[in-house]
Image: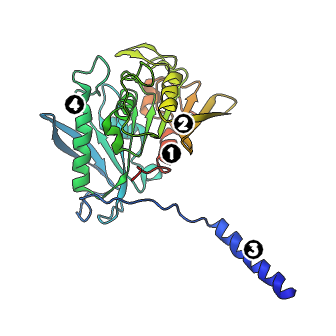
Amino acid sequence: MNALIYLLLLVSFYCNLILAFPQQKVTNVAPSKGCGKSHLLKGVTQYRTVESGGKNRSFGIHLPADYDHDHPYPVVLGFHGSSSIGLFFELDKKLSEPRFSEHKIMVYPNGVDGSWAGPSYHKGPVQEDLQFVTDLLSIIRSDFCINNNRIFATGFSNGGGFIGTIACSPVGGEFAALASGSGAFYTDVNGPDNGCAPARTPLPILEIHGGSDRTVNYTGGQGEGGLEPPINMWLAYWAHRNGCIEESEETSFNGTVHHLSWYCQGVEALVQHYKVDDMGHAWASTEPNLSQIAALQGPTHIQASQIIMEFFDRFQKPT
């Protein structure tokens, strides 16, 4: 009897030990052609050009300080807002800092004349910028060691709206998940089935927006570059496209931050949204940043860069 009790206690001990140290989630790794190629500039942003659509396009790329040319890394593309460049996006969102992207490759593309296709103020077709994304990914795969199943994209304002444009196109199939901050969704205003053809569903989507945004109004309407959908309607479009069946909401910070999430095709929180009631047209951050200064406001209760990276960490592209 004592031996049986001892055995049960021993089994219980090892079970608790396993639960205390859960196994790491297994991810599928699809190495790119650039694996094995060495690079000298690590931990700093380097700048490159690529020909796309008959134009010389440019981008910045930031490798982890301990970059290993034989290790396939996740990649995150970051799209700047209008009248801006990738460098300003990098400085404002701080995504190259190890606390947010220690084991990721960050890429900062530059739009034509400081903007991305979709709004009326951009001088160029949507297909031109979508082709640039395709050509850019081809260069990155060829020159750097990346995990093809873990490519992500985020963006702010005009760049955040371009995230929606990517999601509604065949190019969206390249990405494991997408996230937008204060997105201006000029190309997605006519309902879930009108003009949007996602490469696959479900497609993980996250959006963060200020309830006091007067540049890209939360309630939609006429924007600087055309008609914009209400943010809650845009989220409903993606809940429909992703076959979501359940929506939940949590509030925090005395009811000023609203976190909405949807259960979609067996995946928890596949579509997510944060509404920050008192935030204007800025990148949500608990620290001062350039976009907050431009919006004449201070820090917010939530850190978008952390939320987005943790969201990306949950997903990989189906194989």
Q: CA distance from mark 3 to mark 4?
A: 61 Å
Category of crowding for the residue at label 1, using alpha-carbon neighbours closer than 10 angstroms: few (below 14), some (14–19), many (at least 20):
some
Nearest the viewer among 187 and 73 is 187
Category of crowding for the residue at label 4, using alpha-carbon neighbours closer than 10 angstroms: few (below 14), some (14–19), many (at least 20):
some
CB under 8 Å between discs 1 and 2: yes
Q: CA distance from mark 4 to mark 2?
A: 29 Å
Q: Sequence-wise, which precedes: disc 4 or disc 1?
A: 4
Q: Residue at the spot x=15%, y=34% of the render? A: 53
Category of crowding for the residue at label 2, using alpha-carbon neighbours closer than 10 angstroms: few (below 14), some (14–19), many (at least 20):
many
Q: CA distance from mark 3 to mark 2?
A: 38 Å
User: Where is residue 160 shown, x and y percent of the image?
Assistant: 40, 31
The disc at residue 311 is: 1
Name which residue type carries label 4: Glu
Q: CA distance from mark 1 to mark 2?
A: 9 Å
Q: Which residue is mark 2?
A: 272
Instruction: Give SS at disc 2.
Output: strand
Name which residue type carries label 2: Gln
Q: Which residue is mark 4?
A: 128
Name which residue type carries label 3: Ser
Q: Which residue is mark 3?
A: 12
CB under 8 Å between discs 3 and 4: no
Q: Sequence-wise, which precedes: disc 3 or disc 1?
A: 3
Q: Sequence-wise, which precedes: disc 1 or disc 2?
A: 2
Which quadrant would residue 128 be assigned to in this image? top left
Compared with 223, 242 (above or below) is below
Instruction: Give SS at disc 3.
Output: helix
User: Where is residue 194 shown, x and y percent of the image?
Assistant: 39, 22
Name which residue type carries label 1: Phe
